Structure formats: C-alpha cells, structure tokens
Image: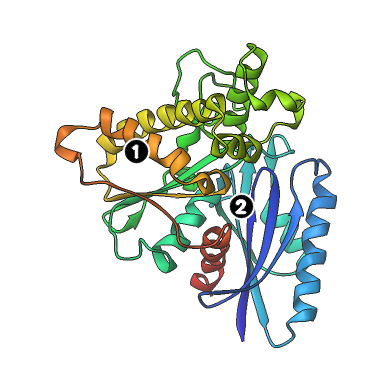
Amino acid sequence: MISAIGIDIGGTNTVVGLVAGSVVLERRVMRTKGATDLDRYVKDIAHIIEAIALDYPHCNIVGIGIGAPNADAVSGHIYHPVNLPWKGEVPLTQLLTARTGLRSYLINDATAAVIGEMRFGNSSNLTDFMVITLGTGIGSGIVANGQLVSGIGGLAGELGHVIAVPGGRSCSCGRSGCLETYASATGLVNTAIERVRSGADTVLNSKPVMDITAEYVYNAALAGDAVAIGVFEHTGFILGTTLADVIALLAPQALVFMGGLAHAGDMLLVPVAQAADAGMLKALKGRVAFTRSVLPDSDAAILGAAQLVFDNR
C-alpha cells in the first residue's frame, strides 16, 4: 500500500501520522516545546518513522510531508519560527531526508491544514474560505476561487501576526500587538494572568499563575466564574474584530476553526461571531459561516502535508 508520513509541527507538540489515501492510519506524538536540540529532535522523528514502518510492513512509505510555522515551501527551510524552540534558518527537509532517506516536503502548517480541509473536510464544496488554527499560536490559510493562496515561498496567511492591538503585547516575531498575543491559547492565558494579578475576585486565584492553562480558564468559565467568562469574551472580541477586517478583504463563504482553543466551542466562537458581525460590512452580514472543522485535531494538517508527497510522485 502506497503511504506517506504527514507531520504537524506545533508549538507544544509534534504529531507524526501515517497516511494512506484519505485515512490517517497511525498518529504518534512527541514534544516540540523544550526540544532545543534540533539534531536530537530530527533523530527522534526519524525513530518514530522507523517504528511506524516496522509496525505497518504492508505500507510502502514513499515520502514525508511536513506542516510547520514559518515554512518556506520552495527552500524547504523554516525561517525564524516564532513558537518553535529553534532560531534562524532551519533546513528541516534536508535534515529529515538525510536521516531517513525519504524525500521530504515542507509547507506552512496552516496551509497544510487548508489542503486537508479542502480535500477531506466539511469545506470541500466551498471555493472561498479561510482556515484558522487556534493553538499555542494562530495560523491561517486561505482558499480563493478554489485555489490555495500561497504567496512568496508559501508564506501567505499569517493572520496571527497582523496587528490587533496597536502598541500592545510584545510578540516573539518582533512586532507588538499581534493577534496571537491575545487570541491564541497563550494569549488567552496571558489575559487571565493579567486579571488575576490585578486582584480580580476569581477562582483562577486558586492556582499559581504559572500553572494557569487555557483548559483551566475554560473549566472555570463553564462553572460560571465571571472573570474566566470575561477572559473568553475579551479574547473573542479581539479575534472577531480582527476577522471583520479579514472578511472585508476576502469575502469568504466560511471561516473554519480548528486547534485546541477551538474546542472551547460557543464559549469562544459566539463572542467571535458577535464581534465580527458588529464590524462586518453590511453587504456581507449573514453570508459568512463560522464553523469548526469536522476533522480530528492535527488530522487536517497531517492529511494536507501527506498530499504533498502523493502530489509529487
């Protein structure tokens, strides 16, 4: 069976998947966060691929597709990754090919997710939509007139690094006020910490601030904590207001959300949709759907990355 490895590199975890056609046969997870030794990281991925190959001897693995932040599809390098533990220029495809002997392809992680969503998700019948991944950071990918918008080196779609709050929080990309410093899981946690430190009366005070997570804030909000609810409302307002500008620019049929923070569902997406609607051009009101992907976490990016292998055979 002709198969490919699809890899989704996130700021917290890396998921290595075995793909045959439209099916992810196997998923294995390793940590990205803290993996400062690049050679060790690449070696660990290679060991996972070797183990998968041994466990699936009937699969003929013909290549590796990788979705990663700040990925240049032409050079196969990651440039100045914001949420990854490496700096400068990372020649990832060359390193993985040298280690595994398999031809490797690289693409922006959110673009990989868009490809997966286009082919296998609930947006396969749409010609104009945007995928927004909400995790450690924020990624996005754009489809216009049925075509993927790639930009120079495939780097188009950096929604996380548009300025949402001028003069706001410092971002590791070097700018200030980037959307992902407010509307990613990391940004949401930082908002919660700010409110705890301001002396707000909240159950969030029951943990040291360094132990506050997005899931913890979500559970507090579900339990009715007003401060936690306010954190989600504030996060949704900033994201939705920014998306109103995106909608004015792209006029998409749908915005498709995926990633860990998207699991908050209505807690986040209702204030997002409300803020977007409030700032939306009247001609577009009621015409843009706000949906969550039906694909399991990481599967969109894994499937999309694997398609790079199949499409280049």
Q: Residue at x 84, y 44 (%)?
A: 37
Q: Residue at x 55, y 24 (%)?
A: 227
Q: Residues within 10 Å of mark 2 (few under 14, many from 20)?
A: many
Residue 157 in sight: no
Q: Earlier in the sequence, mark 1 or mark 2?
A: 2
In the picture, measured across the screen, residue 36 lies left or right of residue 110, that is: right
Name the quarter where the C terminus is drawn: bottom right
Percent x, y for residue 57? 74, 85
Relative to 197, say whether 133 is above or below: below
Viewer-side residue, 134 vs 98? 134
Instruction: Identify the disc placed on residue 273.
Output: 1
Element under disc 2: loop
Q: Residue at x 63, y 41 (%)?
A: 215
Location of residue 103 by image quarter: bottom right
Location of residue 117 by image quarter: bottom left
Name the residue carrying label 2: 76
Location of residue 97 by image quarter: bottom right
